[in-house]
């Protein structure tokens, strides 16, 4: 029987609180569906610093390289704000991303019907929304050379006398690998990819378009591919977001478009994410899953955290790391049911009030719904 290895890194603040609820879901799948998870748990962020003096121990890094998937809670908090930059909690997260070479960042925007009124858009525009933005994460203008702020003394026309430089730079290989990731994901979803760049004004955009097309024509002709300028993409995302399935785009456009898409669906407590790298020997991509939110020090220890973002991150692991798409669907249906029943953590309370449930009660309700479906 296949076992699915998972390294859980709860981290700081509400990270351990939401992870406790994910554990309930994992236990449910083991007990009721006979799926074997080989779960190990370790420290990251401030919690790792407290024990090891570093935000990620070498042996934890090693373990992360070997498992099918890593599930991370959140890192950071006021207790660690004054630490030296080199040992800040965030460095633990960055080390994981860098050493696992996680080049594809996945941000779904999914609208649960019961929460459609939380959207910044009209219900009829977001109802049923289920799109996935794949952002290239390790290259592009955030990393390209040359970069810096220089004096521009020889240019008398330049008031202030300085110039700031960043370089958008992509190799064909970097584009092809993230395109492949997007096509693979599309095959497990709606089989459509829309690639976004600015090929009208940027050479790197022309290369992007050509290489995505190349990967499509040579390796994924069965997936439907379209291209769109990123500025039009921004308009289309708020005008008619349902037209998309998978969107693949570069680091900068993806940063902005994924944040915009996130707000189509409401609360930070509902948003999962994943970062994928190259396929491992078993064909599965290296992968780390994490909620979009941080450690939420303002509500830590109060039972107020919404565990759904982290549970949905685990659902993504089911779908993309373990090939358990039906189980992922089931888990999402259970969450949909709980929300439809009016069960809400404090962050999901509308203006008309009601009594919020605790973090732990939300986890229990989701497990109950799994059993009822
Ligand atoms: P945050 O995401 O932790 O919190 C922002 C607001 O959203 C807070 O009011 C919080 O209570 C609320 N919130 C967040 N997650 C929630 C949930 N699951 N349920 C209910 N309410 C939720 O961002 P903030 O306050 O900017 O950062 C706090 C700490 O987290 C900082 O140390 C920051 O560096 C760290 N951080 C870590 C991230 C990560 O681990 N990936 C990402 C963002 C911030
Ligand atoms: Mg951003």
Image (spheres, rainbow, N blue to C red):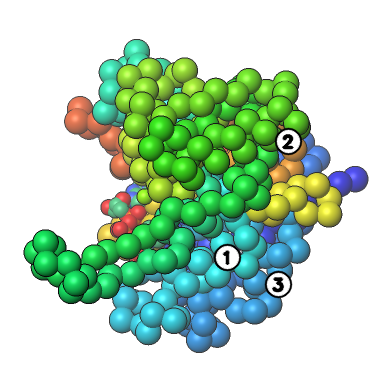
Kind of element beneath mark 2: loop
**What is the C-alpha distance between the residues marked 3 and 2?**
25 Å
**What is the C-alpha distance between the residues marked 1 and 3?**
13 Å
Quarter of the image where the N terminus is located: top right
Q: Is residue 2 left or right of residue 241?
A: right
Quadrant for residue 192, please give it: top right
As drawn, the label of residue 324 is 2
Q: Residue at x 31, y 42 (%)?
A: 346
| Place of residue 305 in the rendered image (x, y in percent of width and height, measured from the top left) | 38, 50
| Place of residue 218 in the rendered image (x, y in percent of width and height, measured from the top left) | 75, 31
Quarter of the image where the C terminus is located: top right
Under 8 Å from ligand 1: the CB of mark 2? no
Residue lying at the far right of the rendered structure: 1
Residue 196 seen by the camera? yes
Q: Residue at x 70, y 45 (%)?
A: 321
Quadrant for residue 332, please give it: top right
As drawn, the label of residue 98 is 1
Q: Nearer the viewer, residue 233 or 200?
A: 200
Query: How many tags in the picture?
Result: 3
Q: Is residue 335 left or right of residue 232?
A: right
Reply above or below: 120 against 268: above
Residue 363 seen by the camera? no
Badge 1 crowding class, 10 Å Cα cut-off, few under 14, some 14 to 19, many 20 or more, is some
Reply above or below: 134 against 326: below
Q: Nearer the viewer, residue 170 or 292?
A: 170
**What is the C-alpha distance between the residues marked 1 and 2?**
27 Å
As drawn, the label of residue 165 is none
Q: Earlier in the sequence, mark 1 or mark 3?
A: 3
Q: Which residue is mark 3?
A: 62
């Amino acid at each position: 029987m296949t076992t699915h290895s998972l390294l859980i890194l709860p981290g700081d603040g509400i990270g351990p609180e939401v992870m406790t609820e994910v554990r309930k879901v994992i236990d449910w799948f083991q007990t009721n569906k006979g799926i074997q998870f080989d779960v190990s748990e370790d420290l990251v962020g401030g919690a790792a610093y407290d024990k090891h003096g570093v935000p990620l121990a070498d042996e934890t890094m090693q373990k992360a390289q070997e498992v099918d998937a890593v599930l991370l809670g959140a890192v950071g908090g006021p207790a660690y704000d004054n630490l030296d930059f080199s040992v800040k909690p965030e460095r633990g997260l960055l080390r994981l991303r860098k050493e696992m070479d996680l080049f594809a960042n996945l941000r779904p925007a999914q609208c649960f019907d019961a929460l459609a009124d939380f959207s910044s858009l009209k219900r009829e525009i977001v109802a049923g929304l289920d799109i996935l933005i794949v952002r290239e994460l390790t290259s592009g203008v955030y990393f390209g050379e040359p970069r810096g702020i220089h004096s521009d003394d020889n240019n008398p026309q330049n008031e202030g006398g300085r110039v700031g430089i960043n370089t958008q730079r992509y190799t064909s290989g970097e584009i092809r690998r993230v395109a492949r990731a997007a096509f693979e994901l599309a095959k497990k979803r709606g089989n459509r990819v829309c690639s976004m760049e600015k090929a009208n004004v940027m050479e790197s955009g022309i290369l992007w378009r050509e290489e995505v097309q190349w990967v499509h024509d040579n390796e994924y002709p069965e997936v439907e591919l379209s291209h769109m300028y990123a500025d039009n993409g921004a308009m289309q995302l708020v005008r008619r977001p349902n037209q998309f399935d998978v969107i693949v785009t570069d680091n900068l456009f993806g940063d902005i478009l994924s944040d915009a898409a996130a707000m189509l669906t409401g609360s930070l407590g509902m948003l999962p994410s994943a970062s994928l790298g190259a396929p491992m020997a078993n064909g599965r991509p290296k992968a780390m899953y994490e909620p979009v939110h941080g450690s939420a020090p303002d509500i830590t220890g109060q039972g107020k955290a919404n565990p759904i973002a982290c549970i949905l991150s685990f659902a993504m692991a089911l779908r993309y790391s373990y090939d358990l798409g039906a189980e992922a669907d089931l888990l999402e249906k259970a969450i949909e049911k709980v929300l439809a029943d009016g069960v809400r953590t404090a962050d999901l309370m509308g203006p008309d009030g009601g009594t919020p449930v605790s973090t732990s009660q939300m986890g229990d309700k989701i497990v109950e719904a799994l059993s009822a479906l």
